[in-house]
Image (cartoon, rainbow, N blue to C red):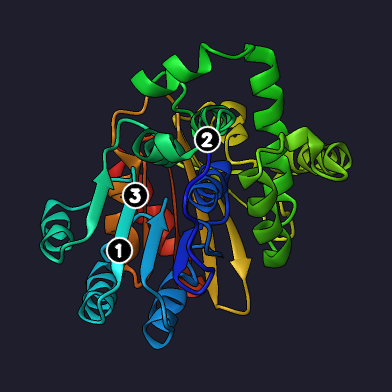
Amino acid sequence: MLYFKPMSGEVVCISHKEDADGIGAASLIKQAFGGSTKLVDYTNMMDILEGLKNESLQTLYICDLGLSKAIQDKFIDVLTALRNKGVEITYIDHHDIDETIKKKIESLGVNFVHKTDECTTVHVYNTYKSKLDGNSSFLASIGAITDHMEDKPIASSLIEGFDWLFTLLESTILAYIITSHQKDDEYLVNLVDSLSKSMYPHEILNAFEFVNQQARKITEAIEYIKKNMKLMSNLACVDITGYDVVVVNFVPGLAGKDVGITYKLRPENGIYVLSIRGTKSCKIHLGRLVNTVTTELGGSGGGHEKMCGGSIPKDKIDAFLKRFDSKLA
């Protein structure tokens, strides 16, 4: 399919760099509209957005980046400044967002694609599929699987068109490639470029080597968790500083708790980065809870009902864990 792709200086996509949903969404935007990609996490998201006020651009896409109470007002200020400069903005996301903030975003004339019932990559695919090639639905399927949203209406219909085991394999490969390169933004931007050209994850250079390395690190981290996790009244938690792997999903099962938390120190920022997971038995919306508790303690957070995260000043980690645990009762 042929369509106009603007020059890289005219279009910018900012997306979440930590998982396949954010990377996948950026890749589909790249395929549809060209331009340049900036990948962020929640610790530097606002700094990157603030920097755009001094750049020359015509169109901005913001993908898979939820808003915590701690940053939502600053986020609105940046969007206002960019809109006043005539920048066309599209914000595509699926995280829980305060209704008041949603109305403010829409009042700015932002193209706002937001529903919590599908992952962001599926939203991007469904919105721009006329501009995307045939493999784009496969990347959307990967985004849904890695975000644990494969049973949602659009996602499930897309996934049905592919072999389940192959899709699961490709999802795992991409997730592990992304996790193993979190400190290499240049690599991740190049990964977006490769995926935008319809490469399968297993075709990425050294893909299986990265998977093997990551699997070994995860195995080591699981053993560490078994020996070092702390049991509280309603959750289990463990400090995983030094481990560059996503292992929070193992904590509830290993501990026999409905909620598991891992936290990792970032000394350069003076914060602990939090990852939180809940089982199906957990009845509390963890994304809303972490948003509230982290904001009360000078941090930020948010996310889905059972999958979320945030950050907290390093001297507030104990207070956070105690307060979070008490509110799960």
Residue 8 image-quadrant placement: bottom right
Where residue 88 sits: x, y (%)?
29, 66
Q: How many marks?
A: 3
Which is more foreground, mark 1 or mark 2? 1
Say whether disc 3 or disc 2 marks the residue closer to the N-terminus.
3
Say few, some or many: other residues with alpha carbon within 10 Å of mark 3 (under 14 / 14 to 19 / 20 or more).
Answer: many
Amino acid type, label 2: Gly
Q: Residues at badges 1 and 2 in contact (C-beta under 8 Å)? A: no
Q: Where residue 92 is drawn, which disc sits there?
A: 3
Question: Does residue 53 appear in this view?
Answer: yes
Q: Where residue 143 is drawn, which disc sits there?
A: 2
Question: Does residue 70 appear in this view?
Answer: no
Determine whether 178 is above or below 174 in the image: below
Q: Secondary structure at mark 3?
A: strand
Q: Residue at x 52, y 68 (%)?
A: 7
Q: Residue at x 62, y 33 (%)?
A: 250
Q: Secondary structure at mark 2?
A: helix
Q: Which of these two is toward me, 67 or 299?
A: 67
Q: Residue at x 64, y 11 (%)?
A: 163
- Answer with left or right where residue 260 lies relative to residue 220: left
Residue 104 image-quadrant placement: bottom left
Where residue 186 sits: x, y (%)?
71, 66
Where residue 213 sits: x, y (%)?
86, 43
According to the picture, the residue beneath numbered tag 1 turns out to be 89
Q: Residues at badges 3 and 2 in contact (C-beta under 8 Å)? A: no
Mark 1–mark 2 Cα distance, whole angstroms, equals 23 Å
Say whether disc 1 or disc 2 marks the residue closer to the N-terminus.
1
